[in-house]
Image: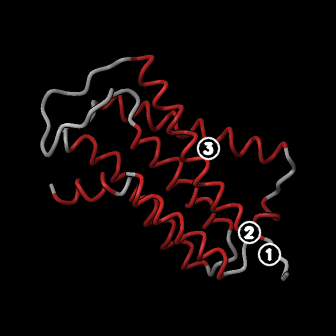
Amino acid sequence: MQAAVIFTESGRFLPLLSIGLIGIATLAAARLALWMGAGVLVSQIMSQGVVELIKIFFHRARPDHWLVYHEPGYSYPSGHASTAIVFFGSWLLIILMAPLPRLAKIVCAAVLFVWMLAIDWSRLALGAHYLTDVIGGTLFGIFWVSMVLAVLARLGVAASDLRAKRKAA
């Protein structure tokens, strides 16, 4: 039960902001493009705004049985499930494209992937969502990240640009 609470809490504003700032600081220390980390934070904020509008449209009540505390708001789609993909999934993509040693990439990517799954699990384990809410949030997150990547590709941002070291000022 405590693990579910930890994973759920990691999908809230302050932990996400903290993780995002640590990620940006890490990019700066590695002399990589800071816009990637800032972009993840902006994308996260914008996607959650859209999720809230979708929740108002569907107007779906949350499950009746809660294990820890009752959250306000509507249930579909799960904002935490979309966060798992948009925020943690975007950091996973950044790590996979970063010029890191192979073992570091594998370990970091595995941790982020498991964390994404654990957030979804936590929403079900705590009774905060129906399975369809989590599936809907996950699909929305995949759609959102895909659209962001399509826009970046349209703007001509290639994977090689993402791997390039920042120019010294």
Callout in the foreground (1, 3): 1
Q: Earlier in the sequence, mark 1 or mark 3?
A: 3
Q: Contact (CB < 8 A) between labels 1 and 3?
A: no
Expressed as whole percent of the image width and height from the top left, the position of residue 114 reads: 39, 59
Tag 3: residue type? Val
Structural distance between the alpha carbons of marks 1 and 2: 6 Å
Q: Is residue 61 above or below residue 162?
A: above
In the foreground, 131 or 33: 33
Circle 2 is placed at which residue position? 33
Quadrant location, the C terminus: bottom right
Callout in the foreground (2, 3): 2
State the residue at coordinates (23%, 54%).
4
Q: Secondary structure at mark 3?
A: helix
Q: Contact (CB < 8 A) between labels 1 and 2?
A: yes
Expressed as whole percent of the image width and height from the top left, the position of residue 49 reads: 52, 35
Circle 1 is placed at which residue position? 166
Structural distance between the alpha carbons of marks 1 and 3: 24 Å
Q: Mark 2, residues whose alpha carbon is within 10 Å: few (<14), some, or many (≥20)?
A: some
Tag 2: residue type? Ala
Q: Secondary structure at mark 1?
A: loop
